Image: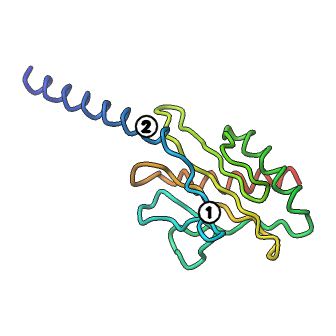
């Protein structure tokens, strides 16, 4: 019995070390940035959502409609929303903002990017985990929370 408990404890320690290492790796990364003026498409794993590509079924979220509001005002308000929700803005080019959110328990970093599409009166949003495969819906929930908080403030 004690060999079994020792093996179980050993496996648990290995898992904890791997989680800590992966969390550290995620914090060492940076936001992906724009590609040809658009947010980057989501990779295959289900730990990313993006409004830029409506044909990308499981990764698609609707953009934020800012009709009737100047883009500068919308982005200023979105910066406040990000701060209110615990994000840290890493890059701010006015019409493009990249922020980082970290999980409470392990400190895994997720990127949130916002890009103004002035012609369509929209802000495109991308939220993605830097490491791992699944996110249990955390990125989709974060985007919906950003949009909801934005609407509350307008």
Please name which of the two marks, 1 or 2, marks the residue nearer to the observer.
1
From what the image shows, is residue 58 above or below residue 32?
below
Residue at position x 80%, y 44% in the image? 80
Q: Nearer the viewer, residue 29 or 126?
A: 29
SS of the residue under disc 2: helix
Q: Quadrant of residue 6?
A: top left
Task: Tell me, for residue 59, which label it has, or none.
Answer: none
Q: Position of residue 49 (x, y in %)?
A: 56, 62
Percent x, y of residue 68: 92, 68
Residue at 55% across, 56% down = 32
**Residue at 53% from the left image edge and 37% from the top image edge:** 103
Q: Is residue 21 left or right of residue 49?
A: left
Checking the image for residue 23, the label placed there is: 2
The image quadrant where one finds the C terminus is bottom right
Labels 1 and 2: the sequence-earlier one = 2
Q: x and y percent of residue 92 in the render? A: 73, 49
- Give the total of numbered labels: 2
Circle 2 residues within 10 Å: few <14, some 14–19, many ≥20 = many
Q: What residue do we see at 50% from left, 69% from top? A: 58
Instruction: Tell me the residue that label 1 is attached to.
Output: 34
Quarter of the image that includes the N terminus: top left
């Amino acid at each position: 019995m004690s060999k079994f408990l020792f093996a179980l404890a050993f496996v648990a320690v290995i898992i904890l070390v791997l989680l800590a290492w992966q969390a550290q790796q995620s914090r060492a990364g940076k936001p992906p940035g724009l590609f040809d003026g658009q947010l980057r498409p989501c990779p295959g794993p289900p730990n990313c959502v993006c409004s830029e590509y409506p044909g990308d079924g499981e990764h698609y979220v609707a953009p934020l409609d800012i009709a009737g509001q100047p883009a500068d005002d919308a982005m200023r308000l979105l910066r406040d929303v990000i701060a209110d929700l615990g994000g840290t803005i890493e890059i701010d080019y006015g019409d493009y903002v990249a922020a980082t959110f970290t999980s409470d328990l392990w400190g895994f970093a997720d990127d949130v990017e916002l890009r103004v599409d002035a012609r369509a009166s929209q802000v495109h949003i991308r939220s993605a985990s830097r490491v791992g495969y699944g996110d249990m819906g955390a990125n989709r929930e974060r985007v919906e929370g950003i949009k909801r908080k934005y609407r509350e403030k307008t």
